[in-house]
């Protein structure tokens, strides 16, 4: 086990305040945006300087940066529903262990869709429904739907299904 030894420094000796010139990188100061102070930029005189690292990017003990890989967007129900906002949809839902109504059908104008919910409005009553996709069985439309694949599958981006 390593035990740190105390350093005996003469009381009247000055503390070192600079590094050897060979290990120093000169810097230049540049005014930043108004009210933001000064930006310090390394002036390497043409030598190779490490690239700037974006905030939040992990750095290893060897100085290598790890750029996170952004996952490819995929086709999910909420994305398909968002492409068809304003259209009339018939939504078939199942509610397990519900003695009053096990299955229910909702019909209305598609207003919004999220990862876990769908919002429709009934044009005749004006009532809005917030439906959980957890209970979703399937959805039908009485008109063609928009289906644009967001990740370039080589098909027509304005593909319409009936």
Image (cartoon, rainbow, N blue to C red):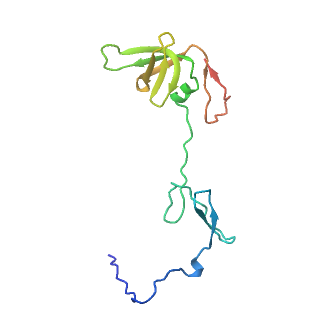
Residue 97 x, y percent position in the rendering = 31, 20
Q: Residue at x 35, y 13 (%)?
A: 101
Is 2 placed above or below 129 here?
below
| Quadrant of residue 133 within the rendered picture | top left
Is 34 placed above or below 13 here?
above
Residue 89 x, y percent position in the rendering = 52, 17
Is 72 placed above or below 76 here?
below
In the picture, which quadrant includes the C terminus? Answer: top right
Is 140 placed above or below 37 here?
above
In the picture, which quadrant includes the N terminus? Answer: bottom left
Residue 96 x, y percent position in the rendering = 34, 20
In this view, the residue in front, 54 or 128, is 128
| Quadrant of residue 153 within the rendered picture | top right
Residue furthest top in the image: 124
Q: Residue at x 47, y 17 (%)?
A: 91
Residue furthest front in the image: 35
In the image: residue 95, left or right of residue 54: left
In the image: residue 36, left or right of residue 114: right
In this view, the residue in front, 140 or 11, is 11
Q: Residue at x 44, y 89 (%)?
A: 13
| Quadrant of residue 32 within the rendered picture | bottom right
Q: Residue at x 37, y 84 (%)?
A: 7
């Amino acid at each position: 086990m390593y035990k740190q030894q105390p350093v005996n420094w003469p009381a009247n000796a000055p503390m070192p305040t600079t590094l050897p010139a060979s290990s120093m990188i000169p810097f230049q100061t540049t005014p930043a945006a108004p009210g933001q102070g000064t930006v310090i930029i390394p002036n390497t005189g043409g030598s190779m300087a490490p690239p700037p690292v974006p905030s939040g990017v992990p750095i290893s003990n060897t100085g290598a940066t790890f750029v996170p890989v952004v996952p490819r967007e995929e086709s999910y129900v909420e994305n398909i529903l968002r492409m068809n906002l304003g259209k009339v949809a018939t939504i078939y839902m199942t509610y397990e262990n519900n003695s009053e109504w096990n299955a229910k059908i909702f019909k209305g104008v598609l207003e919004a869709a999220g990862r876990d919910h769908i919002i429709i409005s009934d044009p005749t009553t004006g009532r809005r429904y917030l439906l959980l996709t957890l209970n979703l069985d399937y959805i039908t439309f009485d008109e063609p739907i928009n289906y644009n694949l967001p990740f370039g599958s080589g098909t027509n981006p304005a593909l319409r299904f009936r």
